[in-house]
Image: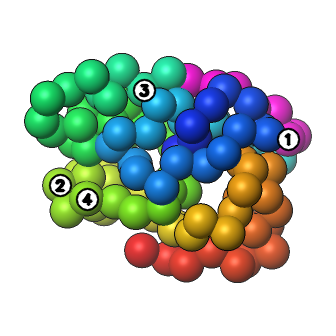
Amino acid sequence: MISSQGNTLQSQPSLRFGRSPFYIKYNLSDDAWSAHKNEAVKESSGAGVAASQYIINHQASTVLSGRFGPNAQRALSYSGIKMLTFDETYETIQSVIDGYKSNRLKEF
């Protein structure tokens, strides 16, 4: 899952995990993808934990985002989900995917 500002592979990546408007679920084995609206963005507090639960429920093995808050980090780590970070130099979700495939993202 990749935190995203929009619902396409050309969308700008979101640097905020819990407050990301969308998540792009991407399957490396067949390049299939789907966009998912982040309902946790509406939370007045605890958005990171609610977003983490959504990721866990979707059985993602890895999450890519600009940064993770401490509560989201704990929830994802406890669930065995790998977290990788990107920075603002990645302009599209596709560029984040390419960065992941070439091992340019940093493990959180």
- Where residue 27 sits in the image (x, y, percent)? 74, 42
Viewer-proximal residue, 7 or 83?
7
How busy is the neighbourhood of tag 3: few (under 14 within 10 Å), some, or many (20 plus)?
many
Apparent side of residue 75 relative to residue 14 in the rendered image (left or right): left
Q: Is residue 29 above or below residue 15?
A: above
Which numbered disc, 4 or 2, marks the residue closer to the eye?
4
Res 71 visible: yes
The residue pinned by badge 1 equals 31
What residue did someone put label 2 on?
A: 71
Instruction: Tell me which amino acid carries mark 4.
Output: Gly
Residue 69's disc is 4
What SS does tag 4 mark?
loop
Residue at image location 80% in from the left, 74% down from the top: 102
Q: Which of pointers 1 and 3 lies earlier in the amino acid sequence?
A: 1
Is residue 78 something one can see in this rendering? no
The answer to whether 67 appears left or right of 40 in the picture is right
Local crowd size for mark 1, using a 10 Å CA cut-off: few (<14), some (14–19), many (≥20): few
Which contiguous range is marked in magenta? 30-36
Q: CA distance from mark 1 to mark 3?
A: 22 Å
Q: Nearer the viewer, mark 1 or mark 3?
A: 3
Instruction: Give whichever of 47, 60 is nearer the camera.
Output: 47
SS at mark 3?
loop
